[in-house]
Image: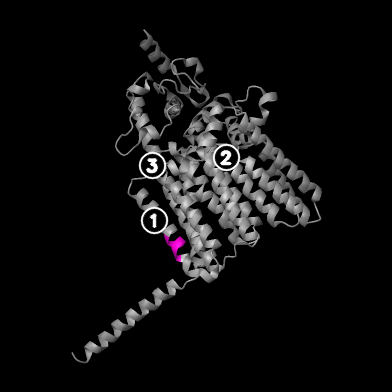
Amino acid sequence: MSVIEPRQDVAVVRQETARASNAGALMDRDPVEIGRALIYAALVAVLLERMLAIASDLHLWGDGTWFLLRIASTRDYYFWVGDWRSGLFRSRIFTLLAEQTPLVLATHLRIHSLHILSLIYGTTLYSHALLSLYICYRYAAKRWYMLFPLLSLFAGSMNAEGYICTDSHFLVSLYWPVLFILLFQEELKKGTLLLLLALSIPTVLSYESMMFFGIILAGVCLWRWKTFSHSRTVVAGLAAWYLLGAALALAAFIWPFDPANKSGFVHGLLWIPQSDHLAAKTSILVLSCCAVLLATPSRLAKLWLFPSGIGLAAILYLWVEVLSGRAPVGLDVLVPARILNLVTPLAATALLFAVLFGWFKPDRKAIGLTAILVGALGLGQALWTFGCMTEWQGMLATLRYELLLHEGPVAYEDSVMSRDRLGPLHLSRLHANWPLPLLSIYESGQGEVRSIVSPSVGAYLPVDPLNPSTLPDLSRYRVYYDSYRAALDRNKR
């Protein structure tokens, strides 16, 4: 025994020494490598999240259902502008053309399923952000500059994708590629110039965010005009185009199509501190931590521990809340997309300019720690959207069950959909109220529509459940209202 025991102790010591050395090697590992791995993992998670969001019809929340049924029934674009001569400046026509063209084309094919049309529409709405990132990747002067558009997507747009059919998402997808091309392409070759022009055209009639993005892009054009001697005429024309877009956006803000848009934009600036949107608050905190990491000089590297730890702790808390089922708590808090799609891109742009102008001089480790935060946030945002999809599908299942129990119109106040809570579901925060008649028609699938849930009194009515003549003609997709009309007549008698 006296001979064997020392040998066992030596083996144990060697194992512990090996574990300690491996742990030390892990701690000393280049943070850029860890950040790169997290970024790739986040992109895979976002791609999977988008595929599942499209399959679960998450894009039909809010305006999405109305756009889908309107275009499916008319087989034409939906512009909602009455007088083009007086209302063109607020028409957002280019955004609508980009978002609706694949769906309009699909209605002229031999497609007889609303769900297939929904898949096409959802793919259109969820894909432009990924295409935008790819273009930025192609034209980035340094690969790590991709952290800024990624931060814009993870911290801003993904928090508002329950309301993805808004123009503000599309404008951000145009803004970043245009900015990267103008900043990092010294010579605008033919292919690059055509792409730049194609991306710039839709910005002239766009969202309120163009008031700010247009000024930035015009300023970058002025810098290019002074810095490079070639393509000055093109650059001057682009600067004028972006300023025109900013002016039209300002006019649309002052004289909006709906007065609620103006007040919503102003009051929405104070929305984030007052909301209970955990993912949005976490994103703002992580964005601030990234700014501190990039701004802190390497001689104060010991201070990097604090923003890194705070950011990772916030993201970990977000993961725990989603996995435990305590969050999210509905989709209505995602409505202020215009704010999230303005504040975070502007903040990310300011960080990018601070690096390019030399105000911030981050070293490799600071960049790696920032990449770790951005990648972890992307994973957290994908997990958050998975939670939103679960709640959305639960609400749709509840609506389908409610429709099976009735015939004819169902008053909102008498419906289970009016409840604040149903088990873990916050029903009143999941359907936005006014789209309920449209969701009732869509969820009937192919066949007879037996019942339609009406919204609450005073809600916006794109279709009137009590007036069957206002219901969209979807017979092409084998959706009929004969049973519903018969039930409505019986109820009237």
The foreground one among 4 and 226 is 226
Residue placed under numbered mark 3 in the picture: 390
User: Which element carries disc 1, helix, strand or loop?
Assistant: helix
N-terminal of the pair, mark 3 or mark 1, is 1
User: Which element carries disc 2, helix, strand or loop?
Assistant: helix
What kind of secondary structure does the magenta stretch mostly adopt? Answer: helix
* Residue pictured at 43% horizontal, 72% vertical: 27
- Residue 384 falls left or right of residue 4: right
Q: Residue furthest top?
A: 493
* Residue pictured at 67% horizontal, 28% vertical: 88
Q: What is the three-letter code of the residue carrying label 2?
A: Ser
Q: Tell me the number on the disc at residue 316.
A: 1
* Residue pictured at 46% horizontal, 61% vertical: 307
N-terminal of the pair, mark 2 or mark 3, is 2
Give residue 477's position: percent from left, percent from top.
50, 26
Q: What is the three-letter code of the residue carrying label 3?
A: Thr
- Residue 172 in the image: above or below residue 404: below
- Residue 224 falls left or right of residue 92: right
Give residue 41's position: percent from left, percent from top.
48, 57
The magenta span reads 305-309
Q: Badge 3, how many Cα within 10 Å: few under 14, some, many 20+?
A: some
Residue 229 visible at all: yes
N-terminal of the pair, mark 2 or mark 1, is 2
Disc 3 from disc 1: Cα separation: 20 Å
- Residue 252 in the image: above or below residue 139: above
- Residue 300 in the image: above or below residue 432: below
Q: Is mark 2 in CB contact (under 8 Å) with mark 3?
A: no
Please identify, in this view, whether the residue under mark 2 or under mark 3 is nearer the observer: 2
Q: Tell me the number on the disc at residue 168.
A: 2
* Number of numbered discs on residues: 3
